[in-house]
Amino acid sequence: MVPIANALYYVSIFSVLLPIIFLLKKKQNFKIAFIKIFGMLLFISAFSDWGGYILIKLGKSNISIINTYTLIEFFLLSCIYYLLLKNKKNVYIALVIFIIFFIINIIFIQPFSEFQNWTLVLESVIIFIYSIKYYLKLYNIPMASLFRFHLFWLNTAIFYYFGASILIFLCSNYILKNMSAEMGIEIWMFHNFNSIIKNILFTVAICYVGAKQDEAYDGRNMSHI
């Protein structure tokens, strides 16, 4: 299983190139506010993955990069859902809760030098709730239009990744401390698989930006709710 896990790791850290390439091919879409934020998220994700890989190859810990990326990722995804969701107050509340917990976690539970799985769990839960709330806003859209709507695919990528990864993040510290390195690698390969699927769905979302919608539904109107 370890060779498969290693292969998934390499595919995972390079899979982020797929949505980045398609995004750069459609530079005109950077005029859209959420695309600018989404583009930042993709590039920071790539630097985080590759920076972490370089540190590992140098025999150093990549934990600080992972913890920093978690904070940035949550902030950028919250900005995206701030643009997409009608109730902005909920996003503000979630940001405050996350930041307070992040600080408390660093001071009393898991120092910044340690893998902060509890912060990842909280991030996953909040972002997962964001995605469910946005699905509810898409409820009345005709199916034919829904599958050509870029924000549906973006939301699906986020819904899938964070929903599928919550249990992994919840158990990750126990895995790191109580299991062999080989077993940890094999279990973490499920996270890498989720990351690959997420980046594929991100790419689908980018491909549908600007896609023509049915007359019954104009996708441009939904990008502002």
Image (spheres, rainbow, N blue to C red):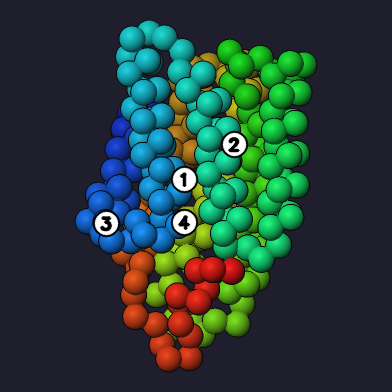
Disc 2 target residue: 168
* First of labels 2, 1 by sequence position: 2
Say which of 164 and 98 sits in front: 98
Circle on res. 27: 3
Asked if residue 139 lies left or right of residue 105, the reply is left
- Which x, y percent locates residue 32? 41, 61
Q: Nearer the viewer, mark 2 or mark 4?
A: 4
Asked if residue 51 lies left or right of residue 160, the reply is left
Dots 2 and 1: beta carbons under 8 Å? yes
Three-letter amino acid code of the residue under disc 4:
Phe
Distance of mark 2 from mark 3, alpha carbons?
A: 35 Å
Q: Residue at x 28, y 43 (%)?
A: 17
Three-letter amino acid code of the residue under disc 3:
Lys
Disc 1 target residue: 194
* First of labels 4, 1 by sequence position: 4
Three-letter amino acid code of the residue under disc 2:
Ile
Disc 4 residue crowd, few under 14, some 14–19, many 20+, Cα 10 Å: many
* First of labels 3, 1 by sequence position: 3
Disc 4 target residue: 34
Dots 2 and 3: beta carbons under 8 Å? no
Q: Residue at x 34, y 43 (%)?
A: 16
The N terminus is located in which quarter?
top left
Numbered disc 3: secondary structure:
helix
Image: 176 above or below 209: above
Distance of mark 2 from mark 4, alpha carbons?
A: 28 Å
* First of labels 2, 4 by sequence position: 4
* First of labels 2, 3 by sequence position: 3
Numbered disc 1: secondary structure:
helix
Q: Nearer the viewer, mark 3 or mark 1?
A: 3
Numbered disc 4: secondary structure:
helix
Say which of 5 and 216 sits in front: 216
